[in-house]
Amino acid sequence: MGRRKARELALQVLYQIEITGDKPEKALTDVSLRVTLEPEVFEFIDQLVNGTIRNLEKIDLMIQGALENWQLERLAMIDRNILRLALGERMTFGSAIPAKVTINEAIELAKRYSTEDSGTFVNGVLDRLIEKE
């Protein structure tokens, strides 16, 4: 299983946390019970999720600052979590994962799990935010 699938699972964990209010540990356990994961893949998912949760307040402020005439709470929940995941990845792994890779993976997640326009939206927000790095 590659990192793309790991990001998909991390997105599912973040979504579960937001929907149910579950603790990250429970949501991570749930995903590990549903899917057979190699230890290094589970570790990557764990780092993505916990890095995002640990920096959630800062991430949400960053997203809000990049939105034009829109509120974070009004974003589709899946889009909000894709943006959070991408920024959490940047904060957790920094330059170890190129910014272009993070952005492209987020766009692919948006295309797969959200609306027709979400890939363009996610790309625009992340381009604004990651340019500031």
Image (cartoon, rainbow, N blue to C red):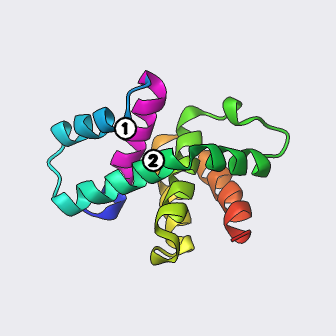
Say if the magenta span includes residue 14. Answer: yes
Do labels 1 and 2 touch, CB within 8 Å? Answer: no
Q: Residue at x 71, y 46 (%)?
A: 61
Q: Secondary structure at mark 2?
A: helix
Which of the image's four quarters has the N terminus? bottom left
* Residue 117 at least partly seen: no
Crowd around label 2: few <14 · some 14–19 · many ≥20 (10 Å): few
Say if the magenta span includes residue 24. Answer: no
Q: Residue at x 56, y 50 (%)?
A: 55
| 33 to 95, vertically: above or below | above
Which residue corresponds to mark 1? 24
Kind of residue sitting beneath label 1: Pro
* Residue 121 at least partly seen: yes
Q: Residue furthest front?
A: 54
The picture places residue 81, in percent across and down from the top left corner, at 53, 42
| 72 to 86, vertically: above or below | above
Nearest to N terminus: mark 1 or mark 2 = 1
| 67 to 133, vertically: above or below | above
The picture places residue 27, in percent across and down from the top left corner, at 32, 35
Query: Does 26 sit left or right of 91 as displayed?
Result: left
Q: Residue at x 45, y 76 (%)?
A: 96
Span highlighted in magenta in the image? 7-20
Which residue corresponds to mark 2? 112
The picture places residue 94, in percent across and down from the top left corner, at 52, 71
Between residue 28 and residue 9, name the one nearer to us.
28
Which of the image's four quarters has the C terminus? bottom right
Query: Does 47 sit left or right of 40 as displayed?
Result: right
Q: Nearer the viewer, mark 1 or mark 2?
A: 1
Kind of residue sitting beneath label 2: Arg
- Give the Cα distance between marks 1 and 2: 24 Å
